[in-house]
Amino acid sequence: MYAILTALESELECFVEKTSIKTIDIWNNYKFVVGVFAGQDCVIGYTGIGKVNASVVVSHIIEKYKPQSFFYTGIAGALRSDLNIGDVVIAGDSMQWDVNLTAFGFKIGELPSIVSPSGENKKTDNIRFYKTEQKLLGKALKWNPGGFKVTQGRIITGDSFFTTILRDYKADLIQELDCSAVDMEGAAAGAACKIYNTPFFLARVISDTTEGKTPKRFKVFMNDASRKMSELVEHILLT
């Protein structure tokens, strides 16, 4: 089984339309569609906005359904001037830009290693970047629909909406880390998957540019974004 999540229900619509539904599971007011998508058993749902919602729902999905891989898709803001509305960024990795333990000698986004209280697990490396599973990434980069740019890049995640002002304020960090896009859930979902040792894939459709341009017809854009992401995941699962 595979898991497919988005932040918003509107980002999920095309996935559900293409799914042969077996059951609909309800958990704490969250609705998860279980069925067949692209010939594979899948659980599909949305988390709500923000890192806490994303990590909690991802953890629940992994605990209950034990997916072999996790897909998180949706929309994001551009951090590169060459990216336009409707372009797709496939994450090579992701990072939490609003994690700051620099007072203790860590880098922005870096967290200390995880060691179990019982000491059964060996100390791991400090965690800063959450990498996309290489096999899924390789398949995704062979997707060539035409009509818009598809590029690999770093997606950064935080619990603040990246306005143009915040982009300017974080310009040095964006340049240093060579960031492509920013969202509010991706790296948190990746962090949960890392803890559970579950392969993770993250991709986003650009919804606003570095110049602050946004879609004129947002509902139409969201449907198009959902279609693009469903086609991308479908390509990966069928390849």
Image (cartoon, rainbow, N blue to C red):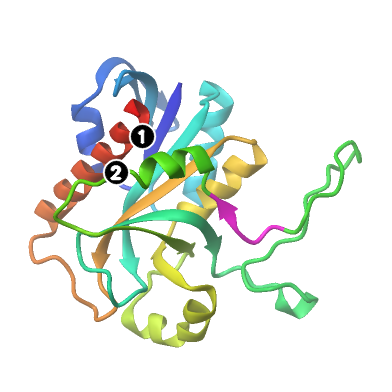
User: In the rendered structure, which amino acid carries the disc numbered 1?
Assistant: Ile
Q: In the figure, 192 relative to 180: above or below? A: above
In the picture, which quadrant includes the C terminus?
top left
Nearer to us in this view, 56 or 17: 17
Q: Is residue 229 above or below residue 81?
A: above
The relative height of residue 150 versus residue 139 in the rendered view (above or below) is below
Q: Main secondary structure of the magenta part?
A: loop
Instruction: Give the spatial CA distance, label 2 vs label 1.
Output: 8 Å
Which region of the structure is painted magenta?
127-131
> Which of the pair 206/103 is nearer the observer?
206
Task: Looking at the image, tell me whether mark 2 or mark 1 is earlier in sequence order.
Answer: 2
Dot 2 lies on which element?
A: loop
* Image spot of residue 19 (x, y percent): 25, 23
Q: Is residue 236 magenta?
A: no
Residue matched to label 1: 236
Label 2 sits on residue: 143
Task: Say above or below: 177 vs 40.
Answer: below
39 lies left or right of 173: left
Q: Could you say which disc has been placed on residue 56 in the image?
A: none
**For residue 13, what is the image quadrant?**
top left
Please, which residue is most extreme toward the top here? Answer: 22
Looking at the image, do the residues carrying marks 2 and 1 touch, with CB atoms under 8 Å apart? Answer: yes
